[in-house]
Amino acid sequence: MDFNKDGTHFATVGKDHNVRVYDEETNAIAHHLGRVFFLNKILKEVGHNNRVFCVKFIPEEPNLLITGGWDCNIIFWDIRENKSIRSFLGPKIAGDAIDYKNGQVITGANRARGQLELWDFKQAELIKSIDYEPGQKSENGAFVYAT
């Protein structure tokens, strides 16, 4: 979960593949982002297709969120429009492993190599991939769960 910069809303994600944004004062759902189903038919195909482990508000823009999970999709959401505004295929996120600063997104992947990746937020393009190997080098690498 994450709070927006002024603390008026918080967002949650989880195993049902959805993003919920709550009004902090009332604790009521203000926005529901993700797939929309009606009688077992998908009406809207936007969203994650596996567990979502991380959600992050963009500090400079309280209406924008970034999410990531096991499906290797990084999705940018605009709560004013209740939909995704861009996405890219990226790392498998398995924890609180997305952060944002100065127009760049850093992700921590649950894999043995190229665990840390720096992305351009506006272009949704990879800037740099970094192997993270704390301590002794290992052929198994280090799986990242938080950034």
Image (spheres, grey):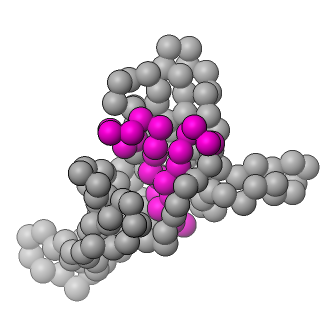
For this orientation, the residue located farthest to the left is: 135
Q: Locate residue 120, reporting x and y percent.
A: 32, 64
Pick whichever, 90 or 62, lies toward us: 62
* Residue that appears at 24% across and 51% down: 102
- Magenta-colored span: 57-82
- Residue beneath the point at 64% across and 38% down: 32
Label the magenta part by its dominant secondary structure. strand
User: On the rendered structure, is 58 left or right of 42?
Assistant: left
Is 80 contained in the magenta span?
A: yes
Image position of 134 with respect to 25: above or below: below
x then y, percent, for residue 27 = 55, 19
Q: Is residue 108 visible?
A: no
| Residue 73: image location, x then y, percent | 51, 65
Nearest the viewer among 71 and 83 is: 83
Quadrant holding the N terminus: top left
Viewer-proximal residue among 146 and 83: 83
Assign the C terminus to one quadrant of the image.
Answer: bottom left
**Among the 4 quarters of the image, the one containing residue 117:** bottom left
Is residue 40 shown to the viewer in this render?
Answer: yes
> Against 63, is 124 above or below?
below
